[in-house]
Image: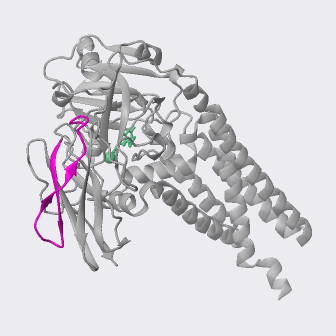
Amino acid sequence: MSTYRESQPRASYGALLGLLSAGAALASAELVAALTGPGSSPVTAVGSAAIDLAPVWLKDFAISTFGNYDKPVLLGGILVVLVAFAAVAGVASTRRFAVGAVMIALLGAVGVLASSTRPDASALTALPSLTAIVIGVAVLRALVRRSTTDNSSSARRTFLVTAGLALAGGVAGKFFQQRSSDIAESRSAIQLPKPVSPAPARPAGHSFAIPDLTPFETPNRDFYRVDTALVIPELRAEEWRLKIHGMVDRPMELSFADLMAKPLIERDITLSCVSNEVGGPYASTARWLGFPLAELLRQAGVRGGATQLVGTDSAGMTIGTPLDVVMDGREAMLAIGMNGEPLLPANGFPVRQLVPGLYGYTSATKWLVDLELTTFEKYDAYWTERQWDPIGKALTASRVDVPKPFARVPAGPVTVAGVAWAQHRGISAAQIRIDGGEWRPVELSTEVSPDTWRQWRTTVQLDKGLHRIEVRAADGRGDWQPEERTRPFPRGATGWHSVAVTVT
Ligand SMILES: Nc1nc2c(c(=O)[nH]1)N[C@H]1C(S)=C(S)[C@@H](COP(=O)(O)O)O[C@H]1N2
Ligand SMILES: [Mo]
């Protein structure tokens, strides 16, 4: 038995060799990525590629099942596959070294492929993955040699040292990646200017004080986040530049200081996501500070025939916006502040676009660095390529926040409340019905702007038992939300939100 083990180590032993090699490979890649940028880390690059390649149904499923945790879940999944593959490679290497080595190299090759095909790839983006191949194979070779020639206690020492070095290298790599691009400092150095056109005062009655009702203004930390960015792009305001080009008479380049020096406006605007399911959480409202986009485009001199404004972020992701909507008089802007602070990194620091009345995916480019005027025929942006509607007009939506779904409430008068939004058209009425009965009106909070949501509330008498509360709203033109339930793809979900509650 023991002689057998010497020539053919146990599988668990081989698996350990594979994991140590893969760990060392990843750690070396993270260290190199500290120089070449966090997006070039092989795990991140593979994750980003997976997001871009994922079919619509899978993205929908991930957003609605894991919500804001969709990205950690994806990274976790990648790591599980990686660990399994590395373990098998390790076992193989103890039988035939070349087979294990090729498998470890293949893992790195996936990283090379993913990182070098990212839209923001440069000559150096594949370097971390290439390093991983070299280090992974070298460490595997050293470990296999050592474990066949040495006694078991010195082999154990080698393993521990390798594991320790890999762990330290990985942690150091992540640390330096953050340090090299630390934007907290850039963000806190910003003194936002006062707007020349402040937001109109919010009228009395614009907000109801009801526990658990969505507040009118979303605190920055609670603002929803939806994007394809696995690592939040880290752009320093001092280094930020925006190019405006394409079908314009006067191409321009702007710095953050240029933008801050312009006469800014401040407006309350509700932003929502096309992927929001009926009753879902992906809508928020903030007081945004920025410069009017239409005015900026007029300064650049838009040429006749341009129909689409394509915004590109610092990682090369694109969003296409219908130009006529931007220019029709609504207050589209390039925003630099939300609720009195610079943008949060997750919400587009230092500069993002906003167009009231359009879903985020056709209007709200975060980490914006490039604006090109073109036509819809000439260019398909990221989501249009994936068959989403190119216009992205925000549909009317309403939600019951109080009582919560499946709440147990005492019999008698029950407070029912929620929010409704139809950006740029405004909300003119909302109604609820109980158990499919007659629709009854509810009280709306005073409108702040047609670009923002409105809260609604009412009190109903409910008897003991299970009840279903439904809500629907009408936009500023008096058009009611349709009953028909549709999925978010390709132009936004429709249907009435309902909650079931038990009255005790
Ligand atoms: N650069 C970039 N901007 C983006 C996206 C993205 O994936 N990348 N997603 C868009 C989508 S789909 C929405 S709904 C809004 C969400 O903005 P928020 O995360 O600040 O709420 O950002 C938009 N801007
Ligand atoms: Mo979205």
Instruction: Please state which of residues 302 and 451 is positioned toward the viewer in this rendering.
Output: 451
The C terminus - image quarter: bottom left
Q: Position of residue 224 (x, y in %)?
A: 40, 47
- Work out whether residue 491 can be spotted: no
Q: Which residue lies furthest to the front in this view?
A: 412
- Left or right for 156, reference 114: right
Q: Position of residue 430 (x, y in %)?
A: 17, 53
Residue positioned 28% across, 33% down in the render: 203
Q: Quadrant of ligand 1?
A: top left
Instruction: Please state which of residues 231 and 328 is positioned toward the viewer in this rendering.
Output: 328
Give, as a single range, the part of the protein colored magenta: 427-451
Which of the 4 image quadrants contains residue 294? top left
Let me know if residue 445 is in the magenta part.
yes
Residue positioned 45% across, 36% down in the render: 315
The N terminus - image quarter: bottom right
Residue positioned 80% across, 84% down in the render: 4
